[in-house]
Amino acid sequence: MKWFVRKDIDGFFGLAIDNLIQFLLILHLCQVLVGIPADFVYGRTLPGAAISLLLGNLFYSWQAVRIGRALGRDDLTALPYGINTVSLFAFILFIMAPVYRETGDWRLAWQLGVLACLLSGVIEFAGAFVAGWLRRVTPRAALLASLAGIAIGFISMDFALRTWTNPLVALLPLGVILIQYFARIRFPFGLPGGLVAVVLGTVLAWATGMMDGAALSRSTAALGLHPPLPAWGALALLGDGRIWGYLSVILPMGLFNLVGSLQNLESAEAAGDPYPARSSLAVNGGGSMVAALLGSCFPTTIYIGHPGWKGLGARAGYSWLNGVFFLVVCLTGSTALISAAVPLEAGIAIVFWIGIVIGAQAFQAVPRSHAPAVVVGLFPALAGWGLLLIQQGIGPTGDLQGLIDQGILSGGLPGMIALSQGMIFSAMILAATCVFIIERRLFVAALWAAAAAVLSFFGAIHACEIRGADVLGSFGFGAGLDFALGYAMVAALLALTAWWLHRTGQDTRPVDTPEG
């Protein structure tokens, strides 16, 4: 097991582009929605995020090398690691932006965002010590199905739409990636496919006039040394009680990140790379805490996509390369310069391909009879993706409730909204319930349905409120009562059926094939 192989270059391009998108989102949303000056984002927020990326990527690279050498293998792929996209949006939209609108104080909004990131990291760190049990009791199909839904909807479909929006620039890089990684054809001189795709896409973007030379010139204004600085001042707000009012956002996000990272560990094991849950998740949570203490408001996470990077041939090197790259980029203020010089369309083919591989893995790494459960587990993420398209279509000033009241999209829109809320939990529960029904372990299936009833009752899944174009989680006692009662009836039905089968002595062996 080596610290670097040639294929790590391809993996690096894919992971770096994915992370670069998150950094550009941070830069844009912090300025537009929270009023944070660009200089402050470059000088305080991004350096803290870069340090957390460096430490996490170094650990996961070291972990891959250590375990690979212990097993006598040279083909382990380090766990991918980066900024958590869901938490990024949640903390800005539901904590930082409301505080800024209410007080007009961007610095206070930033400080509360820092505390939210810190508390989320604490939740993830603490959860690392019980996640192993959750992984043992949850079927693989349930852990992989929600990842597949997210990969198909939010990764592959999103980047597919970007590709066909700019076909002159994006289709040729996609062809390069498909030739090398579907057909396993090597390019002359051993050139990595990711490098070839990015270079060709960049040349085409500038040749077709897609890029803005003036924007490239303006981006140099941010260049300079931006060392990370501690954010001790934000810790003082722990005592004034204001942050505790946002626990309804922080707690679900912390649990969401924990479960998502756990699913990614299962995905890695399904691809042949066994990593311990406790240390992997503890470092994941520790990375978020380090980010917060250095001024970042955005938790880090074990990324979706391990089988894709493994399919690229990446090993340990792509991870530490990513950490070092963003350390240099953020400490020198080069984020805007890179985004102005290299179009996303030049590299999204790599991430697009990774989403395809993740979706395929959910079917390939589970028993054939569990495939229907995987399909069921896709629905919540696909509902979330559909809702996102509708929100983008009506714009930030749109009125979702008005569309429902007027009968426009009313046939499926309420269900789409409900199914999308807490999608990573609901996908896992629905798929697990189906797995145990397929296996005729109906009492266990009833327990999973009962868990859905409890989560619905307190609003962790399905419950929400609509404000304009935004759909906000609704947490509290009885928040999702209708859904809870529905799941409770399903749980009772499953338990009664299990009792009846046992009492009548009917066959309870699992059905091995759909035909059977």
Image: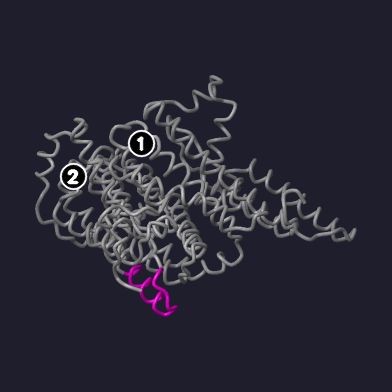
Task: Tell me which amino acid carries mark 1.
Answer: Thr
Of callouts 2 and 1, which one flags the residue occurring earlier in the amino acid sequence? Answer: 1
Q: Position of residue 435 (x, y in %)?
A: 66, 55
Residue at the top extreme of this rendering: 406
Secondary structure found at label 1: helix
Badge 2, how many Cα within 10 Å: few under 14, some, many 20+?
many
Provide the secondary structure element on which disc 2 rests: helix
Tell me how many marks there are.
2
Along the line of sight, the residue nearer the viewer: 186 or 347:
186
Visible in this render: residue 109?
no
User: Which numbered mark, 2 or 1, is in the foreground of this view?
Assistant: 1
Give how far across and how far down residue 293 sits, in percent: 27, 62
**Rendered position, 489 above or below 314:** above
Numbered mark located on residue 97 in the image: none
Q: In this view, does 395 lie above or below 512?
A: above
Say left or right for 382 vs 243: right
Please give the label number shown on residue 163.
1
Whether residue 69 appears in magenta in the rendering, the answer is yes
The answer to whether residue 39 is left or right of residue 96 is left
Residue 178 belongs to magenta span: no
Q: Residue 25 vs residue 284: left or right?
A: left
Chief secondary structure of the magenta portion: helix
Does the CB distance between marks 2 and 1 fall below 8 Å?
no
- Segment colored magenta: 59-75
Q: Where is residue 311 in the image (x, y as percent from the top left)?
A: 42, 57
Question: How far apart in space, not on screen, are marks 2 and 1 (Cα)?
Answer: 22 Å
Q: Can see residue 515?
A: yes
- Seen at 53% across and 36% down, the residue is 417
Amino acid bearing label 2: Ala
Residue 336 got which mark?
2
